[in-house]
Image (cartoon, rainbow, N blue to C red):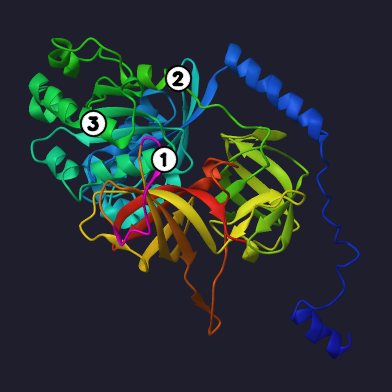
Amino acid sequence: MDPRQLDLSALNLSNDDDDDAKPEEMPHISFAKDKLLEEAKRAIEAEDGNAKKGVSLVVVGHVDAGKSTLMGRLLYELGRLEEKMRIANERGSAKVGKSSFSWAWGLDGTTEERERGITMDIALRSLMTPHRQVTILDAPGHKDFIPNMISGASQADCALLVVDAAHGEFEAGFERGGQTREHLLLVRSLGVSQVIVAVNKLDQVDWDKDRYGEICSLLRPFLVQSGFHPSKTKFVPVAAMEGVNLVTRDVEAAEALKTWYSGPTLVDLLDMLEPPTRDIMAPLRVPISNVFKSHGSGAAVAGRLCGGVIQVGERLRILPGDEISVVKTIEVDDKNVLWAAAGTNVTLYLTSVDPVNLHIGSVLCPTTDLVPLATSFSARIIVFDIQVPITGGTSVELFHHSRDVPATVTKLICILDRASGKALKTSPRVLTKGISAEVKISLRSTTLSGSPMVRPVPLETFAANKDMGRILLRRGGETIAAGIVLAIDV
């Protein structure tokens, strides 16, 4: 053999296998656009009739309130966590001296999460109740991981707030700086309008009815103040470790609770959640919340459809950037489907794309209807409970779905009446807590390859697409404002 040929084969540069390599077959589109929309409408109407309605739920609350333990136990009670896995988790957690975290291990899968005993990223699971197919997004409670929590909340229809009933623990989460308060404000700002409050660890206060009543009476006015309607707010007493009142109260540990509570269980309340209306006529928008390597060639991304319908074989543009990919497979709740509609949490397996060009926070959209890219825009915001006022030139972190970028509040345009939206005062000097205002926000430059440049973000006005038009502003580790995009500067 020619020595040069040996050198080439050692470097995998030879052409020997070229004849054997078959080009990857491109997936074909199954439906024409109008037929796909008709199919989606029929499916949604059928779902309204008798099928299980799909709803996504983000689980939030202060660190150590028992969120992952509650969901791990609930998945087990509903048969979504195998006995073999439960025993393995129980043994593994006992081995590292964290036996009380065994149920949480059902969702906290990484070594670091298990060692530290806290959730750090969003865990995605699904469960079924008699009338609902619920996608669970278990969010981190620790304030260091708020960006991950925002990413999870932006993909949810409803929220489950878990609070710790133990004396001092509930107060720590609810006082200024606690995550109970911040999480409620965040989920409401991101469009979640229904919330179930699970008052957990009541077994640690001997199922004290007065303690349960006290927690409910403290939370109710704050929920209303945060924008939750009382009719869409439900409370339920539970004990996650014991499995009391999650699915049933027919256990010995529930005897004390049964003396004063005869209302619904947690699963009963999950079964009553109302899915919001899905805008399938809007242009397709899929903000990417996770990127991972697929089994074959190409890459896989996870995200939630914020409008429109997607199908296998569809060509999608990835923004920012100029890459075009083709949808090879669509996965919903671990099942392969031909298409998916707005409001669905999906995993998309893409082909014809280099995984290097897929980033968390990028948006997939049709090649014929691109999502606008913005470096400057005007927004209507509501200022939260802040100590230091917002002034023109304030540096902030802008959060939009799973993307966070440095930005500046460049101009305070006017203060608005919260009820009517009318301008009360133009060009104010400062914005203090509780104020609604119109402001101009510009992205700050980031240094890329040695040269500073402003990278645009894909977003839309709230009027065009509600999910794509919501923003959050954070500064110094706390959320200072939330709002909606009014206009994008061209």
Instruction: Work out whether mark 1 precedes mark 3 in sequence or the reverse, and give the earlier one.
Output: 3
| Quadrant occupied by the N terminus | bottom right
**Range shown magenta:** 419-430
Pointer 3 local density, CA inside 10 Å: few below 14, some 14–19, many at least 20: many
Quadrant of the rendered image containing residue 82 = top left
Pointer 2 local density, CA inside 10 Å: few below 14, some 14–19, many at least 20: some
Q: Name the residue under label 2.
A: 129
Instruction: Work out whether mark 3 precedes mark 2 in sequence or the reverse, and give the earlier one.
Output: 2
Q: Name the residue under label 3.
A: 241
- Viewer-nearest residue: 419 or 69: 419
Q: Position of residue 152 (x, y in %)?
A: 43, 45
Kindly identify the amino acid type of the residue bearing the numbered disc 1.
Gly
Quadrant of the rendered image containing residue 32 = top right
| Quadrant occupied by the C terminus | bottom right
- Viewer-nearest residue: 443 or 346: 443
Magenta stretch: includes residue 32: no
Q: Position of residue 100 (x, y in %)?
A: 22, 40
Kindly identify the amino acid type of the residue bearing the numbered disc 2.
Thr
Quadrant of the rendered image containing residue 250 = top left
Q: Considering only vertical position in the picture, is 60 above or below 13?
A: above
